[in-house]
Amino acid sequence: MRNTRMASLLAIGAAATLAATPTPASASTTSGAPAGHLMRQYTQQKLHWQRCDAETPATFQCATLKVPLDYGDPGGRKLDIAVNRLRAGSTKERRGALLFNPGGPGASGLGLPVAMEKYLPQEVKRQYDLIGFDPRGVGQSSPLGCGLSPDELNFDRPYYAKAFAKDVRWARTVADKCLAEEGDKLPHITTRNTARDMDLIRAVLGERKISYFGGSYGTYLGAVYMQMFPTRSDRFVLDSAVDPAQYGRGTFQQMAEATEPAFERWSQWTAQRHTTYQLGKTPAEVRETFWDIVARANRKPVVTDEGPFTGDDIRAMRDMFFRTEQAADWIVGLKKAAERGEPAAPAPDPGLPPENEIASLWAVMCGDTSRAWPHNPEQYRSDAMRDKARYPLYGDFASNIKPCAFWKPGSEAPTKVDNKVKALILQNEWDSQTPLAAARSMHRALHGSRMVTVAGGEGHGVYGAESCADELATVYLTTGRLPAEDLTCRTPATR
């Protein structure tokens, strides 16, 4: 396997009142953080804002916030949380703070306000301070490090009986290394504690409520905040939503399941354009051509500009099939390379993420949901064999063993999302990372939400991509008006 996949599991593309002290409660309760004099050192701290760096516009300012590692022990160890802001363009029109999270888990959030600032309408930027932050353990916020090797970073591992023992060793090694390097921190690097950090940001900024834009995994983080702090949740936009009921192992498996109809759609689209692509006159012929390329590449890897591609490498690029034209161009190049031995251009591939991003991914996801992962390796073997048959493109990748099988549980059980807080959910019909079914599940859990589906919309991330959903999101952020009912719209030219 080439170790150049999955730059981020769920990261989305770039696309003034008195502070309220957090509600008195223990760290294990629904509402959030503990009360008392020990928390005042956090809620009453002053942020020292300064220009972030020479590459960032001077209007963006950065600061560092102190938070407790364990909200049940606020007098104990502290973590640093890196935050940045762009002030609202109008003092008169200013509504408050709009926090951003791009997903992951494990993705840095400091760059999202800078990236989104280019796409946000002026009326949004006049009303909100744009606030970015790196979640605990990520980027500049007391970053985690497990000392993982390049091979250990790669978790796109197909199932083969002869390789399964090696995969089990890999999963156990990652869990053991993280425990050895960061064992004291790991139980507290969770979504619930990141939500508490968000509420502490709110208090220190002097806001009674916060608004929020979260993409991908960031939709789950936003939903958890809404569950824990419903009275402090203002206008929440959840873009490309995770299924809160399946978050964890089910997140991988839902991607595998959703890939099959996307592949079927692609094969129909490509067959209708046989004159252009010469991959088959019928969907069945197109699929046969594809699987022939996979078989050839498993016998003799296809040479590309980035190196050899095995058939499993091609299957691992399953997200490509959610963008029909891009996938057709790529497969044509691979076919020519397999037949003639000429190098083919590889599919767009950002490569492996930094070690911190992968360490944070496992810390958060496994810490949140380790109780729900099987702990018997043979269960993964059985599930991978089953799902390879059900979902041939990616099923065995999704269900094969992961480090969560050997992870020690986080400090709390995961949050059950079930509330009436208002929110707007945006979703492309053909999303490769968070399928339409996942967003619908989030919508069912958030009884006060409205959902806008972009029919025919391709790719991961909606707002700011000039889709038909943009105006609806802008209206909600600037006026608080949700659509009267769920809507499906169609963008004339999908991506």
Image (cartoon, rainbow, N blue to C red):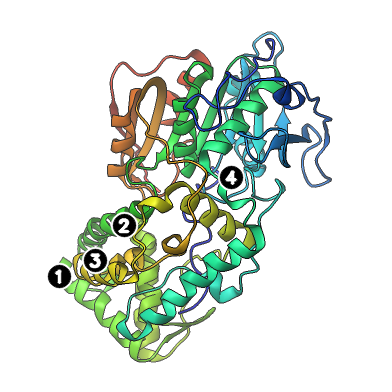
> Residues under labels 4 and 1: Cα distance?
50 Å
Q: Position of residue 363 (x, y in %)?
A: 54, 54
Task: Tell me the amino acid under the disc marked 1.
Answer: Ala
Q: Earlier in the sequence, mark 2 or mark 1?
A: 2
> Residues under labels 2 and 1: Cα distance?
25 Å
The residue beneath circle 4 is 188
Q: Earlier in the sequence, mark 3 or mark 2?
A: 2
The residue beneath circle 2 is 253
The residue beneath circle 1 is 284
Q: Position of residue 156 (x, y in %)?
A: 43, 69
Task: Tell me the amino acid under the disc marked 3.
Answer: Asp
**Mark 2 in CB contact with mark 1 (< 8 angstroms):** no
Q: Position of residue 312 (x, y in %)?
A: 37, 77
What residue is at 66 percent from the left and 63 percent from the top? Answer: 181
Q: Earlier in the sequence, mark 4 or mark 1?
A: 4
| Mark closer to the observer (4, 2) | 4
> Residues under labels 3 and 2: Cα distance?
9 Å
In this view of the protein, which residue sits in the foreground, 458 or 105?
A: 105
What residue is at 58 percent from the left and 54 percent from the top? Answer: 360
The reply, left or right, for residue 84 in relation to residue 289 is right
SS category of the residue bearing label 2: helix
Work out which quarter of the rendered image holds the N terminus and state it.
Answer: bottom left
Q: Could you tell me if residue 118 is visible in this image?
A: yes
Task: Tell me the amino acid under the disc marked 4.
Answer: His
